[in-house]
Amino acid sequence: MTAKELPATAGPLSQAAFERASRLMPGGVNSPARAFGAVGGTPLFIERAEGPYLFDLDGRRYVDYIGSWGPMILGHAQAPVIEAISKAAAKGTSYGAPTEAESRLAEQIIEAVPSIEKVRLVNSGTEATMSAIRVARGATGRDKVIKFSGNYHGHVDSLLVAAGSAAATLGVPDSPGVTKGAGQDTIVLSYNDVEAIENIFAEMGDQIAALILEPVVGNMGCVAPTPEFLKAIRDQTTRHGAILIFDEVMTGFRVAFGGAQERFGVTPDMTTLGKIVGGGMPLGAYGGKAEIMNQVLPAGKVFQAGTLSGNPVAVAAGSATLDILKNDPPYEQLERMGKRLADGLDQAATKAGIPHTVTAVGSMMTLFFNANPVMCWDDADQCDRDAFGRYFWGMIGKGIYMPCSQFEALFFSRLHDEAIIDETIDAATTVLAGL
Ligand SMILES: *Cc1c(COP(=O)(O)O)cnc(C)c1O
């Protein structure tokens, strides 16, 4: 193990930067998950990133297990992606008129993702889920949407109900500013609860426009679906004419090239994408069966638009990323490294006598400070958050940057090789033993 010991706090330059940022921006950040609210202390300010590493303002290097919360599956600042971005930017950064590059990316997405016959590019995962819900309601003429507690679908009003991720971590699952009206057509069920799904469809199946879920949850920590659960949601939505939406913003091109739907062999009616599909630039997408997507303006009547949608620079980054993932697929290696890391973390926690459970699906995983299996939000909620906070800062002290919340899955890239994974396990073994 070579990781040098670092102080288990942010350095002086990050501290100063955070003080300045806090005067200028709410909480000093532009997205709450970055603020270290769940682990305490000052967030590290990042100066640059390269391959599997982040470098902070104080010149410290960290093995990155956030990957920008999902997108950086190839590793940071990879030459083919940077070149594609530079080339596109040199030709102008936005036109507000169609380009061939958009069709190219659309072809790549349609080829990769089994459920997508037609696709619309947007600017974020939030936009993708918001739009997919609108299209599902427009296509079915129904209002009600089913979601699962602890699943996060971006900050869409109607979906900010019992949301996971930063919303759960901060203890405000129902955000102020979301009206009762916005939430009243949202039905929240417990993840992996087959009976609840059968009951709700038996009761009001003809009012349900859509069922949306994370097909592997990343936003309450990593939680996997059971085969029975996946079967129930597909069967019930089909039987009752509701649209099944896989929110693959996190899992798309991550748990398999074609996402969770490829991995599990369950095809939804619509799919939302973000994160990896933009190759580290702001880009999202939603798509599905042609008959559903043809409801979208100007083919159909459901309104959805965007000044920067299909932005040439973002599209270039996304296309270059998907090219590499297709031609030089990292997925077998990600599986192997995922298993190595999951086993290593499990053994480290067992050795330290810490009640825990590890959930992993490929290169997404969580070490839960919880003795019992985590199958839904109520299970995740039982975790020892204080222990997680000490673990987080202990790992920072070893030069390892884990997600700053128990309720966020860690991600790694194709550049996290055996040596890096083993360095991480060694660090965790020491840190957990010292908790
Ligand atoms: C990140 C995420 C979103 C939101 O995407 P943004 O680009 O942050 O708006 C939606 N759904 C899931 C499953 C996500 O992980």
Image (cartoon, rainbow, N blue to C red):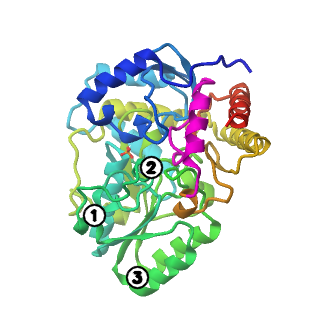
Q: Which of marks 2 and 3 is nearer the N terminus?
A: 2
* x, y percent for residue 144: 33, 73
The residue lying toward the viewer, choosing from 259 and 120, is 259
Residue type marked 3: Gly
Ligand 1 within 8 Å, label 1 CB = no
Residue at the image point whose x is 71% and y is 17% from the top = 2
- Image quarter where the C terminus lies is top right
> In the picture shown, does residue 349 fall above or below 355?
above
| Observer able to see residue 88 | no
Whether label 1 touches label 3, CB < 8 Å: no
Q: What element carries label 2?
A: helix
According to the picture, the residue beneath numbered tag 2 turns out to be 169
On the picture, is 309 further left or further right than 257? left
- Stretch in magenta: 382-410
Asked if labels 2 and 1 touch by Cβ distance under 8 angstroms, the answer is: no
Give residue 295's mark.
1
Q: Which of marks 1 and 3 is in front?
A: 3
Q: Is mark 3 on a helix, strand or loop?
A: helix
Residue 155, image x and y in percent?
A: 33, 51
Mark 1 to mark 2: distance in Å?
37 Å
Q: Give the foreground label among 2 and 3.
A: 2
Question: What residue sits right under mark 3 in the picture?
Answer: 205
Label 1's element?
loop
Which amino acid, by three-letter code, is at mark 1?
Gln
